[in-house]
Image (cartoon, grey):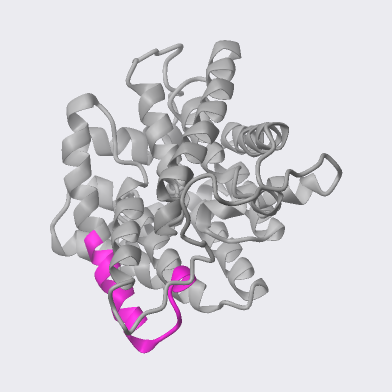
């Protein structure tokens, strides 16, 4: 496997087209803070499975289109080559490319809307990273979140689009919640908590994503499981909505926080694990609060809670241990963007 990886790296270094493909493949992996083209390829397979399983193949098309357009926009804007090659300008546009066909009805103009959104996401990535560099942070997936919120809110004002978020606008506290219960059906729920990172409701997709993580980092895969299980059980304990719980909607933000704090930014250990567990709870509470704020607008929280909670966890600069000194950690979205923007 190592020899194949080295051969691929040499080929992508000397062939611009292969280099672009390599950058695009790393984009899906960078959503979960990994820098590995094989991980990215497996993530695309996971997205494809979920898209077809749910009868929405356009989601796969949107993901690929967003990824390619976002990366191509970064090339046109002449971003620094190392960041580009690591897929750091593909992961947020990929998510935007998934969100647009997920939340808008399928019309020809939707694809133009998606392309414009992917371009905007790359521009917003550059802007936010320039701002967050002041505090030694990175924008994570916030460019995707902000761009998608704008696209969905704007779509309400266009007769050519229909917003399909399946959320009913209401004032906070008006809806009735039905709590879930603990049983073995929670196992696929945990996996759907992983798949919802990419806005897909499929336990098979979640399982493939965990395999993709395992290919690059066993710690990232482990903390992804901890994040999904911890947040879901905590939401269940506090009586969160059962329908949302079953879809894994209370796990995916915590999965990203757990990977970032527990496996990528710190060397895994006892104290780091405790801090990560606290971060999982914090992420869930931020998600619930943000959902309350957005309920009147019928707009999903997306990965906004992950970004907010992780920024709060990083700003105190509690470096419990050195960041793991290996390529998969050094060349993720977290470390590279801070020094290259």
| Secondary structure, magenta segment, majority class | helix
Q: Is residue 117 magenta?
A: yes
Residue at the spot 34% in from the left edge and 54% down from the top edge: 144
Residue 85 is situated, as x and y percent measured from the top left of the image, at: 30, 52
Residue 176 is situated, as x and y percent measured from the top left of the image, at: 64, 50
Residue 217 is situated, as x and y percent measured from the top left of the image, at: 56, 37
Compared with residue 227, is residue 46 higher up or lower down, i.e. above or below?
below
From the viewer's perspective, tell me whether residue 204 is left or right of residue 77: right
Residue at the spot 28% in from the left edge and 73% down from the top edge: 157
Q: Which residues are magenta?
A: 101-120
Compared with residue 199, is residue 288 higher up or lower down, i.e. above or below?
above
Q: Is residue 67 magenta?
A: no
From the viewer's perspective, tell me whether residue 22 is left or right of residue 250: left
Q: Quadrant of residue 137?
A: top left
Compared with residue 316, is residue 182 higher up or lower down, i.e. above or below?
below
Residue at the spot 62% in from the left edge and 75% down from the top edge: 52
């Amino acid at each position: 496997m190592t020899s194949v990886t080295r051969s691929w790296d040499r080929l992508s270094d000397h062939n611009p087209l292969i280099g672009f493909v390599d950058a695009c493949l790393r984009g899906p992996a960078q959503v979960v803070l990994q820098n590995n083209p094989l991980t990215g390829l497996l993530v695309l397979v996971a997205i494809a499975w979920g898209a077809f399983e749910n009868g929405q193949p356009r989601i796969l098309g949107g993901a690929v289109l967003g990824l390619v357009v976002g990366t191509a926009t970064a090339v046109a804007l002449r971003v620094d080559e190392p960041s580009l090659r690591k897929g750091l300008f593909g992961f947020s546009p990929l998510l935007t490319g998934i969100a647009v066909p997920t939340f808008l009805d399928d019309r020809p103009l939707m694809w133009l809307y998606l392309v414009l959104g992917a371009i905007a996401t790359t521009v917003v990535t550059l802007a936010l990273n320039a701002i967050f560099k002041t505090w030694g942070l990175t924008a994570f997936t916030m460019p995707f979140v902000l761009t998608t919120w704008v696209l969905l809110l704007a779509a309400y004002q266009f007769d050519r689009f229909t917003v399909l978020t399946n959320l009913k606008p209401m004032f906070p506290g008006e809806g009735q919640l039905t709590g879930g219960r603990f049983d073995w059906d929670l196992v696929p729920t945990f996996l759907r908590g992983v798949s919802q990172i990419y806005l897909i409701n499929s336990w098979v997709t979640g399982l493939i994503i965990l395999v993709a993580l395992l290919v690059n980092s066993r710690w990232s895969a482990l903390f992804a499981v901890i994040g999904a299980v911890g947040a879901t059980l905590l939401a269940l304990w506090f009586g969160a909505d059962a329908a949302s719980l079953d879809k894994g909607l209370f796990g995916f933000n915590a999965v990203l926080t757990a990977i970032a704090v527990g496996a990528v930014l710190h060397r895994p250990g006892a104290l780091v694990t405790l801090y990560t567990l606290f971060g999982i709870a914090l992420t869930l509470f931020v998600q619930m609060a943000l959902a309350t704020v957005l309920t009147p607008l019928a707009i999903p929280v997306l990965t906004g809670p992950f970004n907010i909670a992780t920024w709060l966890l990083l700003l105190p600069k509690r470096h419990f241990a050195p960041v793991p000194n290996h390529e998969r950690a050094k060349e993720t979205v977290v470390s590279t963007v801070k020094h290259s923007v």
